[in-house]
Image: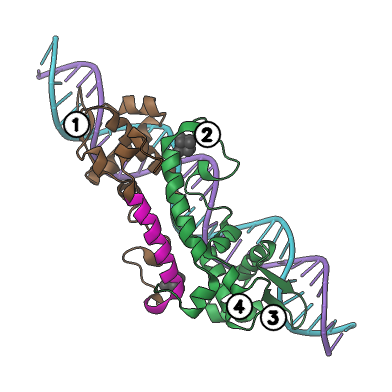
Chain colours: A green, B brown, C cyan, D purple
Amino acid sequence: MQITRQTEYAIKILIELAKSPFGELIPSKLIAEQQDIPGMFLQKTVQLLSRAGLVSTQRGIQGGVRLTVSADKITTADVITAIEGPLALNLCLSPGYSCPNMADCQVRRILGRAQAALLHELQQESIADIVEGKLAK
Amino acid sequence: MQITRQTEYAIKILIELAKSPFGELIPSKLIAEQQDIPGMFLQKTVQLLSRAGLVSTQRGIQGGVRLTVSADKITTADVITAIEGPLALNLCLSPGYSCPNMADCQVRRILGRAQAALLHELQQESIADIVEGKLAK
DNA sequence: ACCAAGAAGACAAACTTAGTCTGAAAAGGA
DNA sequence: TCCTTTTCAGACTAAGTTTGTCTTCTTGGT
Ligand code: SF4
Ligand code: SF4
């Protein structure tokens, strides 16, 4: 019932990118230092974010990572989905899984409600909000 | 980001118990058959519920498991806590963990909010509600 | 050509989960 | 008392997941 270390890294990466002007290229090595993330692992994480379309990368000298979506459009839910796949509180709540009881299972329904509540909150929270510290409602 | 198989078993166990009159002893073997849970594993799960005070057990012939708390007082949150320990969406949100950044970490705060939302929903949902099918709000 | 990045994937160590096995202990009945 | 049924406890194992590392390749700029 936890997000993975990698997901937290991903959030931090996006935060770090959001601190610079939109679209600026930041070398991953620099992010690694700033946020204290193992270098190679960070790169893998960046790739996942890249495949999810949240960032794009540039190779070669002066290369790096940059946001492709403005920070206020990226929600915590998006990040979790990009790294861990669709949010699912139970097997049967993840797409493509099938359980014989699925149709009328009360357990599934109740977990589905909890998941919806969680998802709703996660979708409220953008990276920009985190950077700007808009937390106390 | 999922509940464990064991936690789902635990919910099912409590549902099964809640179907009978309050306080009735049900042998674990019967629960195992009804809910299709591996016998030995079910027993370990019952023990966790027992230690959490949600059920009590009786050994020997005619022994079994019984609720000690009425089903409408047991929430999904209680069950998860009993099996997995306190709900924590991230390391630093679980009691006893300390991270140097904890004091002013924005990531932590935002995850804390999400966790609170989830917890709130889970605390609304009782075992009795599940059994009686009070799901559509 | 050369160098500074990222891309890709194989690999591995550590941890977690799910489940089994074995033996002990309790409760009740013959 | 002895036997059966049931839970209790813990060691054990197999499989899967997480969190990395290592190596090699590709790309882009100078
Ligand atoms: S039994 Fe219900 S909760 Fe469990 S996996 Fe099947 S549908 Fe989901
Ligand atoms: S850095 Fe922030 S979110 Fe991550 S563990 Fe520390 S306090 Fe928690």
Q: Is A102 positioned to the left or the right of B119 in the image?
A: right
Q: Looking at the rendering, in which quadrant would you find the N terminus of chain A?
A: bottom left
Q: CA distance from mark 1 to mark 3?
A: 65 Å
Query: Is B117 above or below relative to B14?
Result: below
Q: Of the two numbered discs 2 and 3 on the same chain, state the one appearing first in sequence.
A: 3
Q: CA distance from mark 2 to mark 3?
A: 46 Å
Q: Secondary structure at mark 1?
A: loop
Q: Is residue A5 visible?
A: no
Q: Is A124 positioned to the left or the right of C5 in the image?
A: left
**What's the amino acid at mark 2?**
Cys
Magenta residue span: B103-123
Q: Write down the residue under mark 1.
A: B23
Q: Quadrant of residue A30?
A: bottom right
Q: Looking at the rendering, in which quadrant would you find the C terminus of chain A?
A: bottom left
Q: Write down the residue under mark 3.
A: A25
Label 2 marks a residue whose chain is: A
Q: CA distance from mark 2 to mark 4?
A: 41 Å
The residue shown at (47%, 32%) is A104
Q: Write down the residue under mark 4.
A: A17
**What's the amino acid at mark 1?**
Gly
Considering the whole magenta stretch, tell me its main secondary structure.
helix
**What's the amino acid at mark 3?**
Leu
Q: Position of residue B116 (x, y in %)?
A: 37, 61
Residue B104 in magenta stretch: yes
